[in-house]
Image (spheres, rainbow, N blue to C red):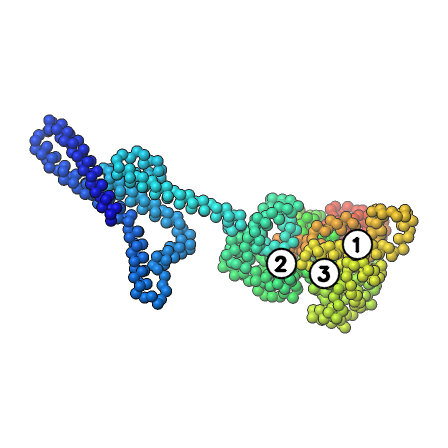
Amino acid sequence: MVVMCFTSLLHKNFSLQYQVSDLQDEFSTLNARLRHCNISDSIDIIDSTPEHNISSASLKITALILSLMMLSLPLVFIKYMEYISNVRRQLDNTTEELSLNKRLAYRVDVFLSFHPYAKPLTLLIATLLLISLGGLALFGVTDDSIADCLWLSWTYVANSGNHTNSEGIGPRLVSVSVSFGGMLIFAMMLGLVSDAISEKFDSLRKGRSEVVEQNHTLILGWSDKLGSLLNQLAIANESLGGGTVVVMAERDKEEMELDIAKMEFDFRGTSVICRSGSPLILADLKKVSVSKARAIVVLAEDGNADQSDARALRTVLSLTGVKEGLRGHIVVELSDLDNEVLVKLVGGDLVETVVAHDVIGRLMIQCARQPGLAQIWEDILGFENCEFYIKKWPQFHGMQFEEVLISFPDAIPCGIKVASSGGKIILNPDDSYLLQEGDEVLVIAEDDDSYAPAPLPMVQGGNLPKNLIIPKTTERILFCGWRRDMEDMILVLDAFLAHGSELWMFNEVCEKEREKKLTDGGLDISRLANIILVNREGNAVIRRHLESLPLESFGSILILADESVEDSAIQADSRSLATLLLIRDIQAKRLPYREAMASKIHRGSSSQGSWREEMQQASDKSVIISEILDPRTKNLLSMSKISDYVLSNELVSMALAMVAEDRQINDVLEELFAEEGNEMQIRGADLYLCEGEELSFYEVLLRARQRREIVIGYRLANAEKAIINPPAKTERRRWSVKDVFVIIADKE
């Protein structure tokens, strides 16, 4: 109040001076007008001018007092709140109550924290108040109109240097005050803008922004298989000019992008977008446009199998809870076959499952029985070479499958998707099957647009040279290590091996615990019909333990990624590689040719070439299948050429990519890996032709149809790799009985 009174007196003093100067100016003006106007008009002007000046002055004083009162009102309100709080505390000393100031501060804090536009709204209101109060104050100390004063106040707020043109103590005092307020407002605005920009960049850096994409492939989770999966998806999208893959995991976005940048492969136009989030949170799923994705891949976590599958189950529950619905299908990688039923029960028709551990176990057994099959599967799975495609061809309606089989020069038909059976895929159907309307043809081709039907060629298969009589002989197989699905692998072997075959199990698990684990897994050892279990306890990376085994007598040796170290791919591969080298070295020293080779080597020589030759000679005596988890270990095994191998993570990634691109392929893979139905096999050429016989590939294909087999490729005797879906199928060539053919045939 003292400040207000002092300001009012100061204003009156300056106002009187301004009025005197104004009266002098008006007096001189009136004298000039009296010379040109009559006396009556002059008297009216003299009478009205003082009244106008008095009313204008009172209005300006009112505006100045109002602006000062509004400035002092918050201070008065705060002091009043403090006074009320103190009075309440004095009246009631027993209860502890927060003051009104603290409550008010708390409410303001809540408002600024929970409302996203609270800070800019507060800044806008403060700016408008400052302009209004400054305009009223300027109106009180100047002769300008209220509109001009408000505009002048805005110029002081926007540019603090504009107040230098003010004249008089009152206008200068008000202009300086408004300019100081403008600098404060500008500093607050600069801070808000800086914070908003920093938050935006921080959100982009941490992967919090929303992905606005359609028909993209969404990958949920992070594992060692991600690199191979991205590579396969990039190859699949190459024919389309590239695609979009979104990866969401509970990792920092910068770390994910750095790890992906280190992957040594070409993305072929495919863009990979990383986001940080949890697939169990619906808000994070919406952030990556889950409802618009054409395929969703749920990767299994590295670690405990049950925990990984439980998390996959919760992820499927979250995906099915998306209100907008899902456009694409869900591909779930599981670690345990027993959990597949639960995931399909929750996901329904949207879910396709790939049980990685079970698939690799069955594939290892197939490769152990048929050396070279691992390379065939690497060519079939994925998108680098030939793969499965399903397409409808109306011109085939009413044709027999035997005619369809030789209708594609650049593809090999191997199945039919029957429309009348609800889209069921039949691998290797009868030759007499008639294609109906809506049926689709399953082929092995290089790409989706690389094949088309052509006129039927004139070829005849002829007769087979001999009947298919492949007698089963007893075998001796060694398992090094222990897997979680050991009981399933034993059952598969028991179904394929001849009666009296031996299965040696060599690992660090004691015999009693082995029997308990096998029994808990559902295996009744007494009901094994064809194999005899032989248990040996020891460490597969200790040489003297391996030397206690008759390694030279085993036809097949499977080096398994041991259950105790399967959580670490590098450690598991190190053990597998060490076991492989130790076994080959022991075999090389025990085989008879060792003495013949030793005579060619000088005594004391440590030639690397001689060691490698011994290893390769030992590899001809038995087949070793190594389960590899890290793709980088593949190069070591490929260079040594002493082992056939199964690249677990890479093969599973290929299968996941194929099912993600076309969910129908999962039915084909499940049958090829199952115990019953059709499978991939390698058979000698002597079953189909005679030595030196000249035949085209189509003629061999028709001969194989007499046993209801489909030949999909061959490997020449002097070649290292097989050729799947060979070109020029009608050209004749001279074959050798040492050549082998890759076929799809019934397991029986």
Identify the disc placed on residue 155. Answer: none
Q: Point out the tag, 3 or 2, that comes first from the N-terminus.
A: 2
| Mark number displayed over residue 581 | 1
Classify residue 660 by image quadrant. Answer: bottom right
Q: Is residue 247 visible?
A: yes
Using the image, determine if residue 735 lies above or below residue 88: above
Disc 3 from disc 1: Cα separation:
17 Å
Residue 225 in view, yes or no: no
The quadrant of the image that shows the C terminus is: bottom right
Residue 566: image location, x then y, percent: 69, 59
Q: Residues within 10 Å of mark 2 (few under 14, many from 20)?
A: many
Q: Within 10 angstroms of label 3, few (less than 14), some, or many (20 or more) residues?
A: many
> Along the line of sight, which residue is nearer the eye, 97 or 344?
97
**Element at label 2:** loop
Q: Which residue is mark 2?
A: 301
Taking depth in this image into account, of 380 and 134 the one nearest to the observer is 134
Q: Residue furthest top?
A: 35
Q: Is residue 219 left or right of residue 7?
A: right
Sequence-wise, the earlier of marks 3 and 1 is: 3
Name the amino acid, label 1. Answer: Leu
Going by the image, does 499 lie left or right of 521? Answer: right
Question: From mark 1 to mark 2, how far is it between C-alphas?
Answer: 30 Å
- SS at badge 1: helix
> N-terminal of the two: label 1 or label 2?
2
The number of numbered discs placed on residues in the rendered structure image is: 3
